[in-house]
Amino acid sequence: MRHEDESEFRQYATDRSHALRRTAYLMCGDWHQAEDLVQTTLLKLYRSWRKVQRLDNRDAYVRKVLVRALIDERRRGWLRERPFGTFPDDVAAVESEVGVGVETRDEMLAALARIPARQRATLVLRFWEDQSVEQAAHVLGCSEGTVKSQTARGLAALRVALEGVRQLSAD
């Protein structure tokens, strides 16, 4: 890779890695896995940077690579293992990043974790990333109708899951 290309890639990666990490976290629900997904995405991006440089909308391409990296990771068996316990995240950092209080954030993340991955990815793209139906369809590699139905089903599932989470926390 030429020095100018590498410099441009480094700048792009530096500028976008924080947003990519947030998006990955919302899709997978685990900060460590989100960091791994971002690293995988950036590696793939680096390998094809000359092609990516010519794209009109790099961010859309990068989000598509991120979603596909998540799908690939989900197919691997080792992700089915669950740790015995969890350590709390840095609450202050997450509050400032997400922009909501701890209880609301915890409830929302717990509810998001309860809905199917495809619906979760659709909701994150549509509402967190503020993507249009057309953009989300492009990233997910499906039709606009599928995005609309996954959004509707995802919102319904999220409402039910959120009620269940709130009932559990009230008990």
Image: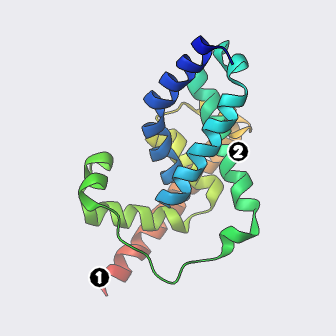
Query: Mark 2: which amino acid?
Result: Arg
Looking at the image, is 159 positioned above or below residue 96? below
Q: Is residue 27 visible?
A: no
User: Do callouts 1 and 2 mark residues in contact (Cβ within 8 Å)?
Assistant: no
Q: Residue at x 31, y 88 (%)?
A: 171
Tell whether 85 sits left or right of 45: left
Q: Position of residue 21 (x, y in %)?
A: 48, 45
Q: Which residue is pictured at 65% across the width and 53% down the height?
A: 118
Precedes in sequence: disc 1 or disc 2 = 2
Reading the image, the residue beneath label 2 is 68
Which numbered circle lies on residue 170?
Answer: 1
Mark 1 vs mark 2: in front: 2
Rendered residue at 65%/51% (across/down): 70
Q: In terms of depth relative to the viewer, which is nearer, 154 or 72?
A: 72
Q: Amino acid at mark 1?
A: Ala
Q: Mark 2 falls on what kind of element?
A: helix
Frontmost residue, 96 versus 9? 9
- Neighbor class of circle 2 (other Cα within 10 Å; few <14, some 14-19, many 20+) is some
